Image (cartoon, rainbow, N blue to C red):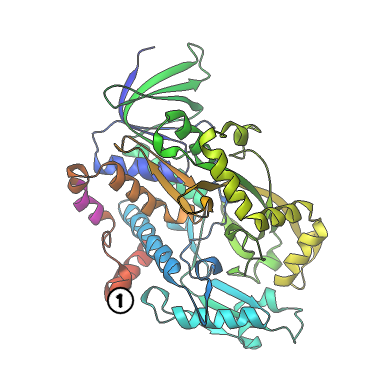
Amino acid sequence: PPIEEVDAVCIGGGIMSATVGLMLKQLEPNWKVVIYERLGALAEESSNGWNNAGTGHSALCEPNYTPASGDTVETSKAITVNENWQLSRQYWAYLATKGLLPEPSSFINNTPHCTFAYGEDQVDWLRKRYAALHKHPLFEGMEYSEDKAQLQKWAPLMMEGRDPSDKVALSRCDVGTDCDFGALTRDLGKAFMNSGGNLLLFHTVTGLKKEADGRWLLTIKKNDLGAKTCQVRSRFVFVGAGGWALLLLQKSKIPEIKGFMGFPISGEFLVCQNPEVVDKHPNKVYGKAAIGAPPMSVPHLDKRIIGGKHMLLFGPFAGFSPRYLKTGSLLDLFKSIRLHNLIPAAAAGLQNLDLTVYLVKQLLASDNKKFAELHNFVPNAKPSDWLLVTAGQRVQIMKKDPKKVGILQFGTEVVAAADGSICGLLGASPGASTAVQVALDVLAKCFAGPQFTKWTPKIQEMIESYGTKLSDDRDKYQRIHKKTAAALKVK
């Protein structure tokens, strides 16, 4: 078959490709933009509601963004994450007002965000966290209490049956949200197609080759009744394929991917669907991680709405599978091994032996052990109300480091070719919540110069605060927050 010519290709049907693809169509309506997804629907992997925490990650409650630092806590990461979240709120609100997203409650709902402290040390840390954050413009309205009667009002499920002598505290932010990122991704996909984009399902990109003129030749496997494969030539390629992004960027042979490797971690959640129990817990409550646990393993008890169903999820419990996607291959981890990433990966592993010990303990943990962890949050929990489900795969980045040879990096990283013709996203949390910030980073990195300058006014029309920090302007933040709250029907 003849080679099809397009302007941009997004590989993978998750929230990142849907966001990048839709933005490109809004900025360049005449471009031919295609999203290829190997499964039968969008958002079947990490973006699926069952495969992520569903938190509108705004650092209102997540302890790993505010580590202890002497007599105070470090807040810079929390402020950055919250700033990034504000961009997502603004973009989704813009899409909703333009009729490109449906009823917002199908993907975003108000759910107070709380941080839970248990024991004197944790309570002392939470007091300091509250003191450091509650006067900041982006965290205004945060409340804190150690009073048992107040805690009973905020989180009745967590206080019922609790030993009166337990030293506990909660901070609470009323403006928190729960997001069904699966539903949002499918809605963004519809908006992309309604804007003239092309989405092709059951299409697997198997080859990436740079041509002499700087464009990319992609080989795509599809189970048609003809040649079974096709080829597409594109000026720009975005690899938003979750855990498989590493393997595809390695196939592209760009030098920037050298030294990178991925360590896959799977997760499990306990799920409660009993309405009598669910109704007693309207919040997302994050606790402190166990010593040696990765940030993604911070225990949390969350009110969730997935596909319209109200439920509670508790976890995550870590697991291990060599797959880079839930529907990936058992050979994924081994396929990613190269001479250039072996030494950095080994160095990162040696520096994180506590993580290895933690993972082994999690793998060996019995159902009773998992239930005991739930008991710390829900003293009256009944085993018959909670079932265990497998969540998605997370692939943590291991990469070269000039000082430590190799490091294990938590978070996400955009890896782009020097000429900006191909770009991919590696890593995990905070992920979907900051999809808009990541998409803007991708476009700024890959289309730097006159192209991006031309786009900037349109970006600022869609995302009013783009290019500024809301932290620096309380009045502007309050005005924009009020506007996005009205558009998305949240606080």
Q: Indicate the quadrant where residue 233 lies.
A: top left
Q: Indicate the quadrant where residue 188 lies.
A: top left
Q: Quadrant of the N terminus?
A: top left
Q: Nearer the viewer, residue 367 or 490?
A: 367
Residue 72 place in picture, x, y as percent:
50, 80
Residue 272 place in picture, x, y as percent:
70, 60
Residue at 50% over, 67% down: 65
Whether residue 45 is visible to the viewer of this picture, yes or no, is no
Q: Is residue 452 left or right of residue 275?
A: left
Residue 129 to residue 485: above or below: below
Q: Indicate the quadrant where residue 462 lies.
A: bottom left
Q: Is residue 338 left or right of residue 462?
A: right
Region in magenta: 455-461
Residue 281 place in picture, x, y as percent:
63, 70
What kind of secondary structure does the magenta stretch mostly adopt? helix
Query: Magenta span has 69?
Result: no
Circle 1 Cα neighbour tier, 10 Å, few/some/many (<14 / 14–19 / ≥20): some
As shown in the figure, which amino acid type bears the numbered disc 1?
Arg
Q: Is residue 63 left or right of residue 416?
A: right
Query: Magenta span has 460?
Result: yes
Residue at 57% over, 44% down: 345
Q: Nearer the viewer, residue 432 or 487?
A: 432
Q: Is residue 469 left or right of residue 14?
A: left
Residue 291 place in picture, x, y as percent:
66, 66
Whether residue 424 is visible to the viewer of this picture, yes or no, is yes
Q: What residue does disc 1 label?
A: 474
Q: Quadrant of the C terminus?
A: bottom left
Residue 167 to residue 298: above or below: below
Q: Secondary structure at mark 1?
A: helix
Residue at 43% over, 18% down: 230
